[in-house]
Each structure stands twice: as C-alpha cells, then as structure tokens.
Image (cartoon, rainbow, N blue to C red):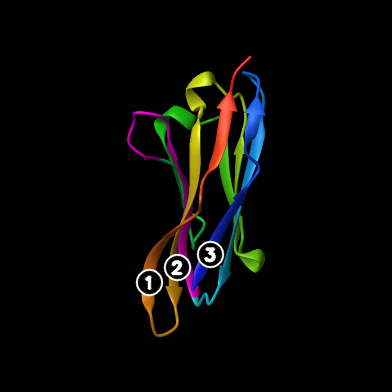
C-alpha cells in the first residue's frame, strides 16, 4: 500500500503565506510525479501544480508567480510554497502521486486533503 499524508493547511490573511507538505510512504518502487490539486465548494477539482521525477514543473495560470512546488526525493515528500495568497485560493488542497509499486505497476494515489482558508 501507499499513503500520502498532507500537512500545513490553515487560516491565513490575504497576502500571507503557507507551506503545504505531502509525504508518501509504503511500498514505493518509483515516483513518476507528485502534485497538488484543489477543490473549492461547488467546483471541480483542479490542478494547482505538478513536479515530475525529472524536476519539470507545471502550474495553473492562476498561481504562477505566487506558488512554488518542490520535492525532496530522499524523503518522498513534495512541498507547495504559497505566497501572496488570495481569498480565491481558499479550497481543500489534495496531494496526488503517480507512484509505482513493485509487482503492482503504476497507479494514482491521493491524500486526504488539507483545508486552506484565506480570509481577513
């Protein structure tokens, strides 16, 4: 099995910063990519940022220049540094991993989600 555990969400004022972390654990053979998605009430889950095993990154247009995704391969952990937060960034943030397990192939895994609220 593979588990993704997120941390770092919370309440922050507009213009503030938060750092999300997501640690992958379990019977991991390889990690192709890890990323962050978010879902606000009444909306579909959307991609925020993704980083591949080759350290290529991709961001949603709405967060470019404000959010930075990074990873620590030794710890199987991905981070999302969020700066200049806006009320419209309020959502549940989900960690995603495209992870390979020996004998079981590559599959998609999700964390349980962490709430980010941007409000004064």
Magenta region, mostly helix, strand or loop? strand
Residue range highlighted in magenta: 30-46
Q: Is residue 36 within the magenta segment? A: yes
List the residue tagged with mark 2: 99
Above/below status of 90 relative to 25:
above
Residue 37 position, x and y percent, is: 44, 43
* Res. 24 image quadrant: bottom right
Above/below status of 72 relative to 38:
below
At x 50%, y 27%, the residue is 89
* Res. 11 image quadrant: top right
Q: Residues within 10 Å of mark 2 (few under 14, many from 20)?
A: many
Residues marked 2 and 3 touching at CB (< 8 Å): no
> In which quadrant of the rendered image does the C terminus lie?
top right
Residue 113 position, x and y percent, is: 51, 46
List the residue tagged with mark 1: 106
Q: Which mark is residue 3?
A: 3
């Amino acid at each position: 099995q593979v588990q993704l555990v997120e941390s770092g969400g919370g309440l922050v004022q507009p213009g503030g910063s938060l750092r999300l972390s997501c640690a992958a654990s379990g019977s991991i053979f390889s990690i192709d990519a890890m990323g962050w998605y978010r879902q606000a009430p009444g909306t579909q889950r959307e991609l925020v940022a993704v980083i591949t095993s080759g350290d290529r990154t991709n961001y949603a247009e709405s967060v470019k220049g404000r959010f930075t995704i990074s990873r620590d391969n030794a710890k199987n952990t991905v981070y999302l540094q969020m700066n200049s937060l806006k009320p419209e960034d309020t959502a549940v943030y989900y960690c995603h991993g495209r992870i390979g397990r020996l004998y079981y192939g590559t599959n998609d895994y999700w964390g349980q989600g962490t709430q980010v609220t941007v409000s004064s």
